[in-house]
Amino acid sequence: MANFIYIFLHYAYEVIPALLIGFFISGFVHELIPEDIVLKYLGSKGIKPILYSTLIGTFLPVCCWGSLPIAVSFYKKGAKLGPILAFLVATPATSISALLVAYSVLGLGFTIYIFFSVIIMGVTIGIVGNMIKYTPRSPEKISCPHCELDPKHELLHKKKTRGEKLAAALKYAYIELPREIGLELFIGLILAALVATYLPIGYLIKTYLSGWLGYLFSVIFGLLMYICSTASVPLIDSLMKQGMNSGAAMTLLLIGPVASYGTILVLKKEYGLKILTVFLTALVASSVLLGIGFQLLMR
């Protein structure tokens, strides 16, 4: 038990400073990037919207669940499928907080590879989405999807003073965002410490997940269990320290935050089984290939 607490505190000391900085930056990103800009660039045709939606999604502090209502609103406005799928990949796959935590725990090389891998995944799946024969819904006039759900949201559209913007950014950074992913972060740290402490788990990982079975585990676990991009970093670190090969760990880090029951159910309902199957197939294939590429680079 003492060893578990020691390892848990070790991870906490590594993660918390990066989280505080990441939350601070995320608060200002959330406050200063208008939703209208996101809607504008995802609602166009061609390769540019895919690139825009991927890059915007990479930095937006929105999790897998938070990106779903935005994607549905794009659909109702008649947006192309490619940018929507790219957004659904890039937005939850990483964030400023996740990148800072990855740099703190896993190092610069790992972090750079994650960042560019997410961009590659988003663009690739977006291009695949544009190739699918798909007829979007007729555009609907929706001034703001959030305002329809919550009339109080209209207050956010009024011009704010600098002080109000600062207060809103800090509130989002240190109250709303920790409330949204704080529990997952805590659970992620506990799982990481548990894996690193409990020797039988380490033996099983070293025995069965050091080779190609590690990729199978990452795909199955990543599809079935939603893990936050930030909270998953300590867990991935502990898995690798116990013997999991780096490529499979990278695969889990890429696929875990994107796949969730919410994503699967919403995609099936709004776009149908065909597009859901294509999305999951492209997600699994790209994450595994990028994981193998990372493993080869690490040799």
Image (spheres, rainbow, N blue to C red):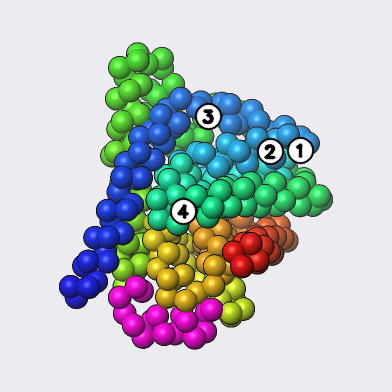
Counting residues from the start of the chain, the first of labels 1 and 3 encountered is: 3
Q: Amino acid at mark 2?
A: Leu
The residue that label 1 is drawn on is: 47
Which SS class for mark 1? Answer: helix
Which corner quadrant holds the N terminus? bottom left
Residue 242 image position (x, y, % from top left): 42, 75
Q: Is residue 45 visible?
A: yes
**What is the magenta range?**
195-210
Residue 55 image position (x, y, % from top left): 61, 38
Counting residues from the start of the chain, the first of labels 3 and 2 encountered is: 3
Mark 4 and 2 residues: CB-CB less than 8 Å, in contact? Answer: no
Residue 153 image position (x, y, % from top left): 40, 29
Q: Residues within 10 Å of mark 4 (few under 14, many from 20)?
A: few
Counting residues from the start of the chain, the first of labels 3 and 4 encountered is: 3
Answer with left or right where residue 124 lies relative to residue 222: right
The residue that label 2 is drawn on is: 51
Numbered circles on residues, count? 4
Task: Give the camera-side residue of 179 and 6.
Answer: 6
Residue 215 image position (x, y, % from top left): 59, 73
Q: Residue at x 33, y 27 (%)?
A: 168
Mark 1 and 2 residues: CB-CB less than 8 Å, in contact? Answer: yes
Q: Residues within 10 Å of mark 2 (few under 14, many from 20)?
A: many
Which SS class for mark 4? Answer: loop
The residue that label 4 is drawn on is: 107
Q: CA distance from mark 3 to mark 4?
A: 33 Å
Q: Is residue 233 magenta?
A: no
The residue that label 3 is drawn on is: 35
Residue projecting furthest to the left: 2
Could you tell me what secondary structure mostly forms the magenta stretch? Answer: helix
Which SS class for mark 3? Answer: helix
Q: Amino acid at mark 3?
A: Glu
Q: Amino acid at mark 1?
A: Ile
